[in-house]
Image (cartoon, grey):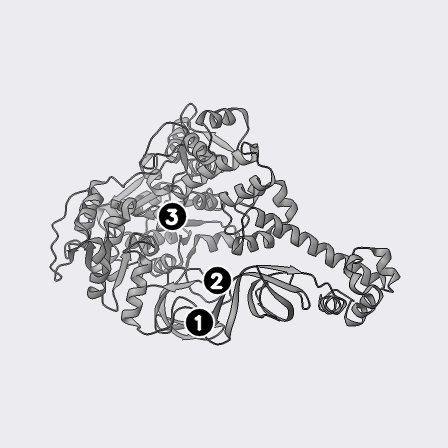
Amino acid sequence: MFNFGEILSIKRSDQGNGWGVFNTEGGLVTGVCHTARIGAILHAEGGHYNHPIYGQQFKASRINIVLPKNADGIEKYLANAKIPGFGKVAAKKLVDYYEDETLDHVMDEKALKQAGLSNKQIDGVIAFFDTRKNHLSFIELLAGADIKGKTAENIMANATIEEVKENPYQLRGKVPRVTLSNCDAIWVYLNGDSRNADRVKAHIMDVMRRANDRGDSGIVLEGSVGYYNLTLIEGAAKSLGVDPEFVEDFLSENDMPLRIYPEGGDIVYTESTYNHEKFIASSLLSNDLPALTEPADLSGMKTLSGEQLQAVEYASKYPVSIVTGAPGTGKTHIIEAICCLATANGLEPVLLAPTGLAARRMQGAGKHEASTIHSFLATKQTFDDVLFIVDEVSMVSLDLMSELLKVIDGHRLVLVGDVDQLPSIEHGQTLYDLIESSVLPVTRLTFNYRSKDSDIIKTALQVLTGENPSLTSDLSRDVCFVQCDDGKVTSIINELVGVSDQVLAPKKKGVAGVGVLNDLLAEKFNPGKDRKRLGFAKGDRVINGKNDRHLNVMNGETGEVIEITDKTVTVNYGGVPVTHEINSVNFKLSLAYALTVHKVQGQEYERVIIAIPKEANIMLSRNLYYTAITRAKKQVVLVGNPEALKIVLSGRCDSHRITGLRHHLKEYAKSS
């Protein structure tokens, strides 16, 4: 560590995170330090760099503060310590009395009284140094576990040293950026016992979490199954560095919030997921509302097909019904018709969707107000005489469906979506399980009103079923495939893309990931701009990543940045300028020239260019590319490796998620 000498002045960040610029005898030092005060001695690790505005500085990766040893330094330190009721006069009084030995007496109430300090000043001085002592102990603990930087800051800001010492594994989920390995490092530093019950439980639950992150509601207990070849016992044993028999014995001897379902089976669920799935089944199948008696007045609508009329009939006859079909099969038309049905029977249609954009489109279709499921749940309203219609149900997670049904339980419900699209990002495959259980009335829309004029839907359905579509590189066709090696995907997309096109990729990272593509396309369409500060510049196309009701901007909306200031970014969303506060909790803007397929689910564009690199590996699923292709209205251009397309069509990366909802639905239907 370098000794920079006495701190002469401090300029703190206004974020409250301890970051500051410390003007020392040895020069400017930037970094994070909560205990720095004027007069203290600063030691730091890091390196020098030349700031373009402020010149030579030392960027510290770690800072240690050493208290001054001489009377002048101690007086300056105490005077700037910001102790309540204790300022320059009190600091001088105390240092005049004890001189160079002042810091030996700051925790001694009797000694402080002897120096002439008031009771308030004494309490303040003791509290200040007691807090500093705890803070230094906290720093020492985390440093001993080799945890530093932002992770250490987050732990100190969101937990006490007592909590960390008691059980570091409780930091998971509570503190941002904290990983299981961080918790392990703290545990080993404090205790060294690798088979402690808290540690073993944490690793077992982490395997469950990874299964949920992958989309599965549960995980196979033991054996070797599935694409990911991960089971609970083997996964936990590998994570802990122990034999599988140890984990098996531990599970049999200790209570954990886990359930095996069905009874006698080999799939393990967390207690909460098990309860969510069981509740969804009972809520949907216990609804015994009678059929509606009045027919819908459809005189102001286009004529409905037989399939569409069946969907309206099911909505009238059954308390819960499902409508599924590809883009272009008339789902939006059916929503409008079911709204008419509700009105004819004195019911208020309540339209819901998982995203803000989907809710806006739905509102235009049904001519009734629509909202996101999350915002609806936040209102905590009660309803009488209503009919609920939920669109884009393939995107609705298991947990969200459970929360929704708790509020609307007992009301008439119509679920609408494309079961062949990607399931929710969160675990579960709610719409798929509801349909595959065969215990609820389902209308499957098969006639496509777009396919007669375009090959887009035809190609999407071929990809979905694994049939090899006849694709050429002819850019005049509705669907074409420009073949190339992975290394050329981005450059070819860069040549083909127009300013109004939307580029899609299966992953954020990788040789043809969203990150690389956005950097390349931003420079093409908005060259020569500095994007270091925010990741984008004035003139860039960006996507909003959070719903902001105050600004009336939804997650997934894209626009062009028209102004950037120190504190705000103004984006033009389809002709409506909206100013975002950079420090707002809802501020989440990023480049949108290229997006992941998950990000655009439920949206449509005139022309879509889709990267298909072999490097994407397990992301090369039929569902993903079906979803990507069906985002286009007029043209789809696939760019990538022909071997990657073979992987997609083979279906080897397709895997229906491990869930228990179908079993619960069938079990409840059988018993009722």
Q: Label 2 neighbourhood size at 10 Å, few (<14), some (14-19), many (20+)? A: some
Residue at the spot of label 3: 425
Q: Label 3 neighbourhood size at 10 Å, few (<14), some (14-19), many (20+)? A: some
Residue 445 x %, y %: 24, 46
On residue 551, the disc is: none
Residue 421 x %, y %: 29, 47
The residue at 48%/76% (across/down) is 53
Secondary-structure class at tag 3: loop
Marks 3 and 1 sit apart, C-alpha to C-alpha, by: 29 Å
Q: What amino acid is found at the position of numbered circle 3 in the picture?
A: Ile
Residue at the spot of label 2: 586
- Quarter of the image for residue 600 reads bottom left
Secondary-structure class at tag 2: loop
Q: What amino acid is found at the position of numbered circle 2 in the picture?
A: Asn
Q: What amino acid is found at the position of numbered circle 1 in the picture?
A: Val
**Which of marks 2 and 3 precedes in the sequence?**
3
From the viewer's side, name the closer residue of 395 and 18: 18
Q: Is residue 27 visible?
A: yes
Marks 3 and 2 sit apart, C-alpha to C-alpha, by: 20 Å
Q: Is residue 419 visible?
A: no
Q: Is residue 570 left or right of residue 88?
A: left
Circles 3, 1 touching at the beta carbon (< 8 Å): no
Taking 293 as reference, is 63 above or below it?
below
Marks 2 and 1 sit apart, C-alpha to C-alpha, by: 12 Å
Taking 150 as reference, is 201 above or below it?
above
Residue 567 x %, y %: 49, 72
Residue 404 x %, y %: 46, 46
Secondary-structure class at tag 1: strand
Residue at the spot of label 1: 569
